Amino acid sequence: RYGVSEMVQSQEKLDRTLVRVQDLTTQKAGQLVWVRARIHTSRAKGKQCFLVLRQQQFNVQALVAVGDRASKQMVKFAANITKESIVDIESCSQQDVELHIERIYVISQAEARLPLQLEDAVRPDADGEEEGRATVNQDTKLDNRVIDLRTTTSQAIFRLQSGVCQLFRDTLINKGFVEIQTPKIISAASEGGANVFTVSYFKTSAYLAQSPQLYKQMCICADFDKVFCVGPVFRAEDSNTHRHLTEFVGLDIEMAFNYHYHEVIDSITDTMYDTDFYVLDKYPLAVRPFYTMPDPSNPKYSNSYDMFMRGEEILSGAQRVHDAQLLTERATHHGIDLEKIKAYIDSFRYGAPPHAGGGIGLERVTMLYLGLHNVRQTSMFPRDPKRLTP
């Protein structure tokens, strides 16, 4: 009725239904159910042992007590199962949704010494200082990210982030956008400048894409009209701040417009819903990438914009140059090797609609939406100048 199961190697198919912890409602009172979960905490007291079983963000209390269905040895066995171990239990569900264990088997045993305690990891630093209780610093959490991701806080953050990504997709698809996938290994730095990762590419060098920018525009030239892309982007910036990462998920938009790039701004702001954001327009041309359209009234400025949420930038965008001759001049001005972007420039030689777009950082948006203090909290396995693992 208890013990350590042999390693699951798909030896057999058991005719057994495992009930999810979140589905343990009062309607199952009196029923025998099988549940697989982690041991969150355990507390032995006399002839009984109380367990808190955790399955993702859901918990349930279970009791194993000496009686007809459990021996003293079974209670002792349950009390000695290490925290975070995965167990299968057969139990009778009670009216108040407490499980009375009749059988318990360890499916995967955790080591006795955990690198951090989950209850410490979820405690804010300020609360720990006031109450004299332990907290876990950020580097320790990130060094042991798999354990940290099991906390209810992390489970909630990344489920919400998944929802943000899904909402972005659904909103744009409903507006007639097409989702595209673009190369991440490219022949030239898409944003220009030095903040680019160089990689060996057989007998030559290539770069990790700083954005899907060039390919988004090429798709507009190919008459896709409105496109978006969700994927990794890479920035070789030696910035060790609370809001910078060297790899993050970009939510990128590009679309053709009729007469004015503000049509695109209006379309993008529709995806912001009820967040407190604002837009800054007309940045100096000198600080924008080579493909940015100059302001027709003042060539020192550009048809570019940034969007800010809760005081921090979340999107950078602009009208793009859609004329091959002007694009060539702008690339030359920025010192870009024209041969490396020949295919990109050539795509504008055969008729290209005026277009604009922008890029949003998913992790930064999630951080600001939740009022968190560091973008590493919203990156599942963050990369920054000092972190390459796990």
Image: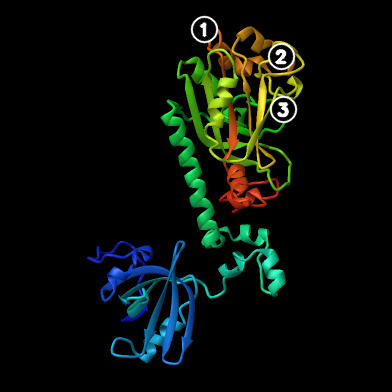
Q: Which residue is mark 1?
A: 350
Q: In the rendering, at what x and y percent does residue 156 appear? A: 51, 56
Q: Which residue is mark 3?
A: 193
Q: In the rendering, at what x and y percent does residue 67 appear? A: 32, 90
Q: What is the spatial separation of the Cα atoms under label 1 and label 2, in whole angstroms?
A: 21 Å
The amino acid pointed to by label 1 is Tyr
Between label 3 and label 1, give the one nearer the viewer: 1
Image: 60 above or below 288: below
Specify the quadrant of the image occupied by residue 117. Answer: bottom right
Quadrant where the C terminus sits is bottom right
Tell me the SS state at disc 1.
Answer: loop
Return the mark for residue 63.
none
Q: Give the total of numbered labels.
A: 3
Residue at 76% over, 21% down? 286
Colouring rule applied to residues: rainbow
Image: 7 above or below 253: below
357 horizontally vs 19: left or right? right
Return the mark for residue 332.
2
The amino acid pointed to by label 3 is Gly
Circle 3 residues within 10 Å: few <14, some 14–19, many ≥20: few
Quadrant where the N terminus sits is bottom left
Circle 2 residues within 10 Å: few <14, some 14–19, many ≥20: few
